[in-house]
Amino acid sequence: MEQIETVAGAEKVSIAPQNDYTVLLNKTVIYIAICSLFGLICAVLSILTTKSIASSDGGVVYAFFVSVLIVAFTIKYFKAFGIITAFVSSLLFCVALKIELIDSVINVGVNTLQAILIYAALKLLNLLAKKERNTNDSKVNRNIFAIIQLIIGIVFTCIEFVNDDTELALRILSGVEAVLFMAFSIIQKKARYGFYALILCLLPSLISGVLNGSLQLNETWTERGIAAETWTLSNFILLASFGFVFVEHIRSERGNVKLTFGEINVKFTTLIYFAATALWNSVFFIVFYVGWLGEHILPFVLPWLVGNVFLLANLYFNSHVEVDRETSAFQWYENRAVVAEKNTQFLISIITFLLPISSSLFNKELTAGVITIFCINIACACLSIGLIWIPNKEIKAMSLIKTLKTIFHLLTVSFLLLSVTMIIVPNFS
């Protein structure tokens, strides 16, 4: 949640945007809130990408650990606060899957430990980067290597969700990654890249993986070994492939900037976008918990992703000053509100016929979950309709109306996609 700041002596003084209501917040509270939100997002992503939910004793057999990337990302940019993301994510994941208390404590503890190790690794890598700052580092080679890592990450993801037996693929890809990082470190003449693979990708994954496997008391030693290997190699490949691209390569310099503390004026509309993002992810958490998503949950990644892209993008850009000239601000906000309202009016015509057509098309009663989400969809659409008259001088009020209409329009689109997915998936799975 960035705001405009200026330096006055040794203190940073926040300049409140003139066209928006603002709230004075402590930056520590903001960092905790952001990392907690990412923890919720991680938990939902882990739930939706869980490959095998329960074993005979009620534990988790295997999950695609893609949330480790978000944990590493938050630690990169929010330092120690990013550990909160791992804690919240693993806690909510255990609650959603209704895992027994002792297994939940183990899972939360191991994931939190892994996050602490990633935090320590990033600090060490930053120190090493300062020592190697004056050495040559070919940007062309970095870009090529990042593309290669992105391809490996995509291949790995496809293998995970296409094949049931991925042990061989894990071993091959992890070996390929080790060789690639050694070769890239030699080519670039920077030990940092070799240490990246070792202390950030491998060691946190290995330590947490071995602990997770050995503490699964209800499993045989063979099963514990498989669990440890799966955890270790999966996290290693993800951190080495996608992790290099998103954590190390993209805007890596900004991730080394120290966090500032104190108080800052935050736009109230930004807080509303933040709440809407949390609401969207909470809905997915709840509908999974109560069993409305059914057995085939992977298709629901699409509506979840679409909603988060919409809301997070608006959250990020809304945190900046939108209009500089106060004379034209009211009209600008009003036009944006009208656009959101007109777009929602078109969607209402689709939503109105969705439920009866679906019921007749599939010739079966719709579930309580589908009907509930459908009602939420209609409610969001209705809340976005009806332009409220605002006096021409009330720019802040018009900005608030624009934000509310935009949010409910985005939720209307997102819930519409979720409703359609909930209707279609059970009939074609």
Image (cartoon, rainbow, N blue to C red):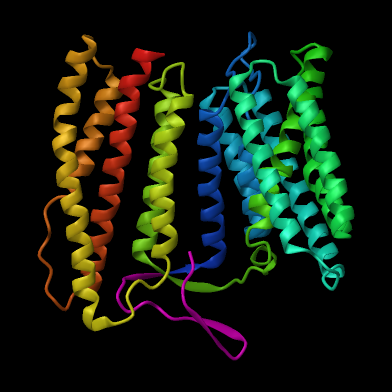
Q: Residue at x 54, y 22 (%)?
A: 98
Q: Position of residue 233 (x, y in %)?
A: 77, 31
Q: Give residue 339's quadrant in the image.
A: bottom left
Q: Residue at x 67, y 61 (%)?
A: 252
Q: Position of residue 115 (x, y in %)?
A: 71, 45
Look at the image and tell me whether residue 195 can be seen: no
Q: Give residue 170's quadrant in the image.
A: top right
Q: How many marks?
A: 0
Left or right: residue 250 versus residue 203 is left
52 to 147, vertically: above or below: above
Left or right: residue 320 versus residue 354 is right
Q: Position of residue 147 (x, y in %)?
A: 66, 48
Is residue 68 in the magenta section?
A: no
Give the position of the C terminus as an image quadrant. top left
Q: Position of residue 125 (x, y in %)?
A: 81, 58
Is residue 7 in the magenta section?
A: yes
* In the image, farthest residue toward the bottom: 9
158 to 187, vertically: above or below: above
Look at the image and tell me whether residue 341 can be seen: yes
306 to 294, vertically: above or below: below
Q: Which residues are magenta?
A: 1-23
> Foreground: 335 or 168?
168
Q: Give residue 374's quadrant in the image.
A: top left
67 to 389, vertically: above or below: above
Left or right: residue 312 versus residue 382 is right
Q: Residue at x 14, y 28 (%)?
A: 353
> Foreground: 175 or 298?
175
